[in-house]
Image (tube, rainbow, N blue to C red):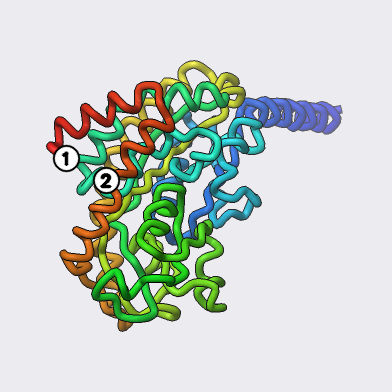
């Protein structure tokens, strides 16, 4: 009799434990976070930090799994639509790659608009309301934005003047960089990050334009020998969440995640600032020549780039012409 009671008590305890476990599991929210960047890119590391911190501030009730390297099959320019349609709840996207759907997202990536992080931050502040409206229109919420560091031209051959690049097949990453390279006499090939190395290896590209961090992560020294810092454009990533998924969270979790994103954004910007020196040193260690582009070459590139600003403002319209005018007044450009 005692044995039977004990056995029944044990079975009841197991059943109760199962109910509690099931209740806990049901309370958890599990999100995949899609990112086209490779697993060693600093943006990916930032996303992993964000995921860890979200777990902490929600006491394990919101769990995020970072899917790097495009493993979910979402290419960079498809990100805005994928987030809108809820294909995944979270996506880290390159904002200027979304200009096919929303041209205004290319504002802060205009060639030579910003010369440093402070100017980039100013440019973004002048159109932030437009950016937020765009994401709301596409059923998304912007959590934070982080730029890539300084831009280089990576070439298989030495480049002293723009004449050395005439007719070269140059990888570009958005409409702004494509327009610039076209006007400079190159043959632009717009590619997402995952397709660059195969194109360099096969001869589909003669040169490419990206940050030192990406070049180091993808071992560009195996395909190019020269890196010239031109700073001809900035690309900013935005981490967004699908609003349908967001609204399912508890209000206290929404507040905690928003607060966390606000706190992490400046920290992630500091990481971006430090990335260039670290990555360019690694490129040099692996035999690459890394240097500033010739000043005369940069002057010529600027001269071609600046008219693109007014073209962009005119084509996009809305508040952009006023934002551009304010930016130029504040920076005296």
Q: Which mark is residue 114?
A: none
Count of residue discs? 2
Q: Is residue 144 visible?
A: yes
Can the viewer see residue 52? no
Of residues 154 and 32, the one drawn nearer to the viewer in this rendering? 154
Label 2 with label 1: CB-CB less than 8 Å: yes
Query: Residue 125: x, y in percent?
Result: 28, 29
Horizontal side of 252 relative to 87 (left or right) equals left
Q: Residue at x 57, y 29 (%)?
A: 242
Residue shown at 28%/27% (left/top)?
A: 323
Q: Is residue 261 above or below residue 322?
A: below
User: How much space separates mark 2 and mark 1, taking CA atoms?
Assistant: 9 Å
Q: Residue at x 26, y 61 (%)?
A: 230
Dot label at residue 333: 1
First-in-chain label (2 vs 1): 2
Q: Between residues 3 and 291, which one lies in front from this camera angle?
A: 291
Categorize mark 1 by other alpha carbons within 10 Å: few (<14), some (14-19), many (20+): few
Query: Residue shown at 34%/66% (left/top)?
Result: 153
Residue tagged 2: 306
Question: Which percent across, then down, holds residue 131?
Answer: 41, 28
Quadrant where the N terminus lies? top right
Task: Locate residue 126: give its quadrant.
Answer: top left
């Amino acid at each position: 009799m005692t044995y039977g009671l004990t056995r029944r008590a044990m079975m009841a305890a197991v059943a109760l434990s199962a109910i509690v476990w099931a209740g806990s599991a049901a309370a958890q929210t599990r999100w995949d976070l899609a990112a086209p960047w490779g697993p060693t890119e600093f943006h990916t590391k930032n996303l992993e930090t964000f995921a860890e911190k979200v777990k902490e501030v929600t006491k394990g009730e919101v769990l995020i799994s970072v899917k790097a390297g495009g493993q979910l099959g979402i290419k960079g320019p498809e990100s805005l639509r994928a987030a809108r349609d809820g294909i995944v709840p979270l996506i880290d996207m390159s904002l200027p790659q979304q200009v096919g759907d929303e041209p205004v997202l290319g504002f802060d990536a205009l060639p030579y608009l910003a010369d440093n992080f402070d100017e980039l931050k100013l440019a973004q502040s002048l159109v932030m309301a437009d950016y937020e409206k765009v994401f709301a229109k596409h059923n998304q919420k912007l959590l934070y934005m982080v730029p890539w560091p300084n831009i280089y031209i990576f070439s298989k051959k030495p480049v002293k003047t723009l004449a050395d690049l005439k007719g070269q097949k140059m990888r570009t990453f958005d409409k702004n960089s494509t327009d610039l390279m076209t006007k400079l006499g190159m043959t632009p090939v717009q590619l997402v990050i995952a397709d660059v190395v195969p194109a360099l290896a096969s001869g589909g590209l003669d040169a490419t334009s990206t940050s030192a961090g990406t070049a180091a992560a993808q071992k560009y020294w195996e395909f190019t020998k020269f890196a010239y810092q031109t700073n001809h454009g900035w690309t900013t990533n935005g981490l967004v969440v699908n609003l349908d998924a967001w609204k399912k969270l508890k209000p206290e979790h929404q507040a905690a995640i928003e607060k966390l994103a606000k706190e992490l954004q400046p920290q992630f910007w500091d990481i971006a600032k430090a990335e260039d020196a670290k990555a360019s040193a690694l490129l040099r260690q692996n035999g690459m020549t890394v240097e500033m582009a010739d000043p005369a070459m940069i002057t010529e590139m600027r001269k071609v780039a600046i008219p693109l600003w007014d073209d962009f403002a005119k084509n996009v319209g809305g508040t952009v012409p006023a934002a551009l005018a304010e930016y130029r007044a504040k920076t005296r450009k």
